[in-house]
Amino acid sequence: MIYMDHSATTPVREEVFEIMKPYFTRSFGNASTFYSLGREAKEAMENARENVASIIGANKDEIIFTSGGTESDNITIQGIAYKLNEMGKGNHIITSSIEHPAVMETCAVLEKKGFEVTYLPVYEEGIVKIEDLKNAIKEETILITIMHANNEIGTLQPVNEIGKIAKENKIKFHTDAVQSVGKIPVDVNEMNVDLLSISSHKIYGPKGIGALYIKKGTRLQPILFGGGQEKDLSPGTENIVGIVGLGEACRLAKEELEKNISYVTNLRDKLIDGVLNSVEKSYINGDKNKRLPGNVNFRFTGIEGESIVLMLDAKGITSSTGSACSSTKLTASHVLKAIGLENVDSHGSLRLTIGPENTEEEVKTVIKEIPPIIEKLRSLSSIWNKDESIWENNTKSCDI
Ligand SMILES: *Cc1c(COP(=O)(O)O)cnc(C)c1O
């Protein structure tokens, strides 16, 4: 099998699994108890917290553990919105139009509760414009939440500039960094960020665990209630096994960051060039350079992304699509719409996300397998070559 869906999830690394093992059985203590078994768990947890803090340049006491990226996004956005609104600071939130559903859906709920949300456009490159952000800020703005790296098209947002503007205007800044932590350098101080979401299973840790960076002095209203763990914000018995796994995943990711960036970027560029050179009317969605090292998002005119994914799967290649119908919701991807692909149905989008364990050989195989699949699907397509005008409008900007 050739696994190229690393933005969806990653396997738990052997080293990470080994470190987790004792905490399932022998060292099973509850970290909130004060006898030695509990202290052992607590110590492991604090060691993990140090490793998570370290990969983003934070202090250990600025990290809380959560059940994953989704919970981190929810705790932050709702927590800031309710707190600052209650204090009479305003009700306006600025985000982008390509956020993960964990942010999008949370903002939608807040809109129903009377908050006002501005969704910044991202244009064909898939990147927000600082000018738009500046224009969107008003007296009532309390929070800017803009992701660091997009999960579908991999584009990187200008978080350092965004953070600077947020700070100048005394607005809280949250970034969903689930896709960027462990893959590119992330430093909370350079970013001027107040809150930052992390997930473990995107960086070779276990599923169901994540973290939230909360800059010292930032106050959130809790949305979950219970035993008071994790500064009252993520209460419930700590998931020690998961926490230990996340900590080790972060430690390894930090250690290998530079090496992985150059290795994965090289594979990505080979894959992009190989496919674009051998398939006519094929394009890259989103800015070609300002993107994650491992993200490739192709667009093929005249066919459906789902069919490509299934045919690649039959060849043992795991990929994904954000196009016409994403796997669980039968709606067009809001990300592809946001980069101007109105006629999403006339394109097939294919996301291949590369990880450090992929090889050059695998990339060569994928480059070899894709063209005949596209040719076959186009020969069966009812729109391919029948009406050129359908796609002429949609292909101008992202052509390479
Ligand atoms: C995967 C992902 C999430 C959700 O994280 P979970 O740990 O799966 O809840 C949030 N944001 C982005 C950008 C993601 O890629």
Image (cartoon, rainbow, N blue to C red):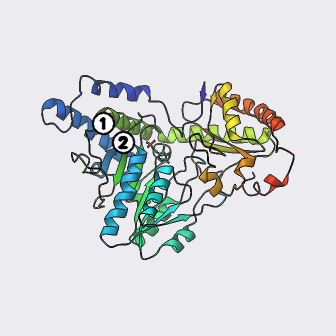
User: What residue is pinned by disc 2?
Assistant: 67
Secondary structure under the numbered disc 2 in the rendered image: loop
User: What label does residue 165 carry, if any?
Assistant: none
From the viewer's perspective, tell me whether residue 383 is left or right of residue 2: right
Q: Amino acid at mark 1?
A: Asn
Question: Distance of mark 1 from mark 2, alpha carbons?
Answer: 8 Å
Rendered residue at 29%/55% (across/down): 222
Of residue 53 and residue 337, the one placed in the foreground of this image is 337
Q: Amino acid at mark 2?
A: Ser
In this view, 103 is above or below 94? above
User: What residue is pinned by disc 1?
Assistant: 239
Secondary structure under the numbered disc 1 in the rendered image: loop
Specify whether residue 280 is in view. Answer: yes
Identify the mark nearer the N-term, 1 or 2. 2
| Residue 178 locus on image (x, y percent) | 46, 46
Of residue 154 and residue 119, the one placed in the foreground of this image is 119
Does the beta carbon at disc 2 come under 8 Å from ligand 1?
yes
Q: Are marks 1 and 2 in contact (CB under 8 Å)?
A: yes
Rendered residue at 49%/64% (across/down): 161
* Image quarter in which the N terminus is found: top right
Of residue 38 and residue 44, the one placed in the foreground of this image is 38
Q: Could you classify mark 2 by the number of other residues whose Cα lies within 10 Å: few (under 14), some (14-19), or many (20 or more)?
A: many
Q: Could you classify mark 1 by the number of other residues whose Cα lies within 10 Å: few (under 14), some (14-19), or many (20 or more)?
A: some
Quarter of the image where one finds residue 174: bottom left
